[in-house]
Image (spheres, helix red, strand yellow):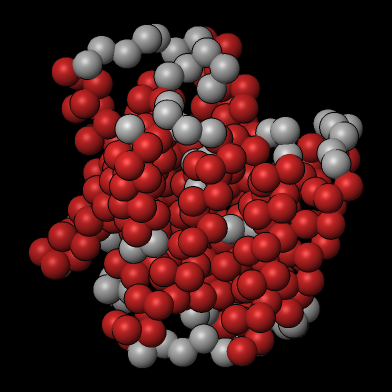
Amino acid sequence: MNIKINLVLVVALFAVSTSSIIARFLPEVSSIVISLWRLVFASIAVWLYSFFKPQNKINKQNIIPFVLSGFFLGLHFVCFYQAVKLTSIANATLLGITAPMFTLLIERFVFKRKFKKIVFIGFIVALIGTIMITSLNFSLTTNSEIGKLFGLSAALCIAFVYLLANKIRTDTSTVSYTRLLYLIAAMLLFIIAYANGENIFVLNKSDFLWLLALGFIPTILGHSLLYYGIKFTSPTIIASVPLGEPVIASILAWMIFLEKVPFITLAGGVLILFGVYLIIVNSPRAHLSENY
């Protein structure tokens, strides 16, 4: 069983690491439309699965948290893909995994929860890495700087999804959770895209193939396998898996797009990875990071 789960986690890691790479093959498609179709295809897949394997009903008290989660998940994808379009894949993915930093701040200062000192040491280390990458230069004068801001915004949005998931997942199965979450997020993005005048259906055939790949590879093969793996191993291990995404994504970006990683990004990235790892491993609520 251990060999099987290890293989599952390896496949999941490589699957989620393809998200930013695939998005680069959609230069003419807006981040809103990319996010919308990714969620639509993923939602269809999960709902088809639940058609053959019926799931429990959703608690009515979770409707509002579900709507909020869907809103932030959709916004997370939009911000992340906008970051990929404007800055390097290394920057976008490294800043995108800083979500545990935001959940830590919210839990500590809003919910007044206590954490071990080493968790805050991890936060400081990750913060230094973030500062190194962003250079605290959010002048918004270059696309790269704007892209970094979108990367951090993506992390903040998924942090809210994690916190809301803590309430929802107490009495909701993984399939029931993801199928409604993806559906709500897709519906909200459809409304936003329509209001924004986006050409949702005016796409090339190749664009639809890449969008289908986003819905299947990083979402179904990536996130769903992580959810499957949590049944057989610890949440901390599952939460730590996505930390490898920036490394694999950066290597793929270098191989495919010849995108080099500057030394400052590499050094800051190492600190972010180590700091976030300390936060996850030593946090009593580590499972909140399993869904990135």
Q: Residue at x 46, y 62 (%)?
A: 245
Q: Is residue 261 left or right of residue 104?
A: left
Relative side of 84 to 2, left or right = right
Residue 272 picture location, percent across and down: 67, 66
235 above or below 62? below
Residue 24 horizontal/vertical position (percent): 33, 74
Closer-to-camera residue (167/38): 167
Rendered-image quadrant of the N terminus = top left
Asked if one can make out residue 253 in the rendered structure from this viewpoint, the answer is: yes
Residue 184 location, quadrant: top left
What residue is rendered at 30% in x and 39% in y?
A: 4
| Residue 291 vs residue 181, the one in the foreground | 291
Residue 152 seen by the camera: no
The answer to whether 186 is drawn above or below residue 260 in the figure is above
Relative depth, front residue between 32 and 8: 8
Residue at the far left in the pictured view: 205
Question: Which residue is rendered at x = 79% and y = 71% of the image?
Answer: 128
* Residue positioned 32% across, 84% down in the render: 255
Q: Toward which corner of the image does residue 188 lie, by quadrant?
A: top left
Measured along the vertical axis of the image, is residue 152 above or below residue 161?
A: below
